[in-house]
Image (spheres, rainbow, N blue to C red):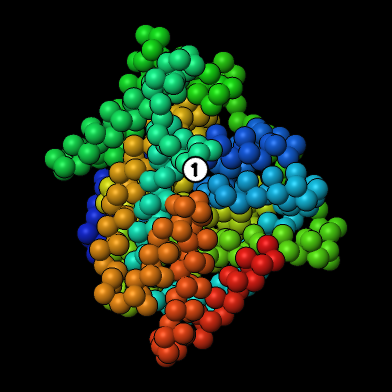
Amino acid sequence: MEEKLDKLFHLKERGTTVRTEVLAGLTTFVTAAYVLAVNPSVMSATGMDSGAVFTATALVCFLGTLVMALLTNYPFVLVPSMGLNAYFAYTVVLGMGYSWEVALAAIFVEGLVFALISLTSLREKIFKAIPLNLKYAISAGIGLFITIIGLKNSGLVVGSSATLVSIFSFSGSAAEGTFNTAGISVVLFCVVLVITGVLMARNVKGNILLGILITWLLGIACELCGLYVPDAAAGYASLLPDFSNGLAVPSLAPTFMKMDFSHLADLGFLVVSFAFLLTSLFDTVGSLIGLGAKANLLDEKGDMPGVGRAMGAESVATMIAGVLGNSATCCSVECAAGIAEGGRTGLMAITTGVLFLLSMFLSPIFLAIPSFVTAPALVIVGSLMASSVLSIDFGDPTESIPAFLCFVGMPFCYSIVEGISMGIISYVGINLLCGNHKKISPMMYVLAVVFILKCVLI
């Protein structure tokens, strides 16, 4: 069996084993499983059936990831985008007044156009046009982006009207009576972050997954002895699996094939579809660059062989999402956790995809893993990806300033796409005014114009 898998996924060629790939896939799943809880919550704000969205989410993750693995043999997992689902629900439906059925049609159209782009040479031109230093910056920026997500999910970093963000106040939590919810989750995060760091320093195999499991088990122990008191309304759910409703899979019928194309010719519909397309395209490009760099899948020029197939898989997954009743997909940045565990092939991705499929039948277990449990893993992975910043040429301001704006733009704007746009626009502007027009490829001019128009029109 191992020989067949090696022949299919080229395990030895990429310096990995079946055990490593399966462990990496499990790690990625546990880290990314929160989408099974978060996505239905966000999408149901539009009036969609949350049970149907849950089932659709699991199916989209499985089918999209399977397509990615079979087409590319890369360790990339596709999941519903946690940014585009918010745009879908709060901007397109609740803000602009479109029905969720029309929004699903826009998702399908965006996926179809993305697929057409993926069939042309434009896909490689976009990928290759981005300068090497910006590619390093994208990888580092995704690391910082993952880190801020982890710090936010842990509760250690909180919003502040005075300073934008601030650190969690234990004394304030005790005074407000929230220490047994928010306070304990922050304590668990800090303790396990140190433990996971020690495991990594001692080269313990599966250190990231162990960190996640340790956080969950400590949380369960705290809940059983009364130190952690669940408060679902405040976002602190029980860590104990709830089997009261059995293991039945929620019906997909309420959202399956419910796309409404009646507004296809409307300008607003086209703008919405374009916004989905632009975000998906560059979210995918950014993730592929960042994750590919950490998995050593880029060549000496910073290009990734088969990137067109990867983008094609993303487009197919998005069309599947529209049909099943879900938001557009993206390449999950949580793949970085599996890559950090040694995942290098499509076997890692398939392992994660199969676990998403099984999650439909074991939803009480996976939905009992709250976001603060995976937070230490995200911060650790962020630190690994941020090391790409060391490869940036800081001796040349025409390279370093755009790269800097790119990697700080992602966490500060809370968007991979916005960080890329800041890097590309500044790169073209600075180098053009410095007379370095030969450094700028025609595609970079096009990308800069597109991002400027996005800022103005969307």
Q: Residue at x 34, y 66 (%)?
A: 136
Above or below: residue 257 compared with residue 115: above
Front residue (pair 201, 328)? 201
Q: Measured from the top left, where is residue 218 in percent x and y?
A: 32, 21
Front residue (pair 435, 30)? 435
| One can see residue 384 in this view | yes
Estimate how packed mark 1 is, as few (under 14), some (14 to 19) or many (20 or more) residues with alpha carbons within 10 Å: few
Above or below: residue 50 compared with residue 245: below
Front residue (pair 73, 114)? 114
| One can see residue 25 in this view | no
On screen, residue 287 versus residue 11, left or right, reads right
Q: Measured from the top left, where is residue 29 in percent x and y?
A: 42, 41
For label 1, the residue is 164
Amino acid at circle 1: Leu
Q: Which quadrant holds residue 435?
A: bottom left
Q: Measured from the top left, where is residue 78 in percent x and y?
A: 50, 52
Q: Residue at x 34, y 71 (%)?
A: 400
Looking at the rendered image, the quarter that the C terminus falls into is bottom right
